[in-house]
């Protein structure tokens, strides 16, 4: 049971029907109300796992020939490797055999 003290308004707790004493002012009163707490839990949607990250590429495809298998399409991304005044480095990953290489611009 949760209630408020009649004299000072402090939150007091106890069982309904029993005498409860306020911890702030010492006033004693009989608990008359009861309260229950509950929490609503929403079910989360389950996600389907497609596989390993390497199987799902999020990079764009470019026309670039793989040195290993000769395939003419590769995923690409750029990254600044050294200082801001140096050109970016292009990275490629073959769409077919997953061989990776870089191109210094």
Image: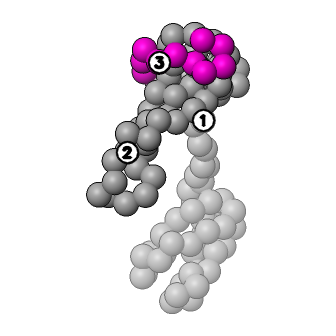
- Residue 29 marker: none
Residue 21: name its quadrant. Answer: bottom right
Along the line of sight, the residue nearer the viewer: 65 or 51: 65
Q: Position of residue 67 (x, y in %)?
A: 60, 21
Left or right: where 49 falls relative to 11: right
Q: Looking at the image, do the residues carrying marks 2 and 3 touch, with CB atoms under 8 Å apart?
A: no
Badge 1 crowding class, 10 Å Cα cut-off, few under 14, some 14 to 19, many 20 or more, is: few
At horizontal 43% and vertical 81% (from top left) the residue drawn is 7
Q: Which residue is mark 3?
A: 64
| Above/below status of 88 relative to 83 | above
Q: Which residue is mark 1?
A: 41
Badge 2 crowding class, 10 Å Cα cut-off, few under 14, some 14 to 19, many 20 or more, is: some
Question: Foreground mark, 1 or 3?
Answer: 3
Q: Position of residue 35 (x, y in %)?
A: 58, 52
- The residue furthest bottom is 25
Q: Which residues are magenta?
A: 60-70
Q: Which one is earlier in the sequence, the residue at label 2 or at label 3?
A: 3
At horizontal 43% and vertical 14% (from top left) the residue drawn is 63
Q: Which residue is mark 2?
A: 88
Please say whether residue 66 is one of the residues in the magenta stretch: yes
Give how far apart the Cα atoms at labels 1 and 3 are: 51 Å
Q: Which one is earlier in the sequence, the residue at label 2 or at label 1?
A: 1
Question: Foreground mark, 2 or 1?
Answer: 2
């Amino acid at each position: 049971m949760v209630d408020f003290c009649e004299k000072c308004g402090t939150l007091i707790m106890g069982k309904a029907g029993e005498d409860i004493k306020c911890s702030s002012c010492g006033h004693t009163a009989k608990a008359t109300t009861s309260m229950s707490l509950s929490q609503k839990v929403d079910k989360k949607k389950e996600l389907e796992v497609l596989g390993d990250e390497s199987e799902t590429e999020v990079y764009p495809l470019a026309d670039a020939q793989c040195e290993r298998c000769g395939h003419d399409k590769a995923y690409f991304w750029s990254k600044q490797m050294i200082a801001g005044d140096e050109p970016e480095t292009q990275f490629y990953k073959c769409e077919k055999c997953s061989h990776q290489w870089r191109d210094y611009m």
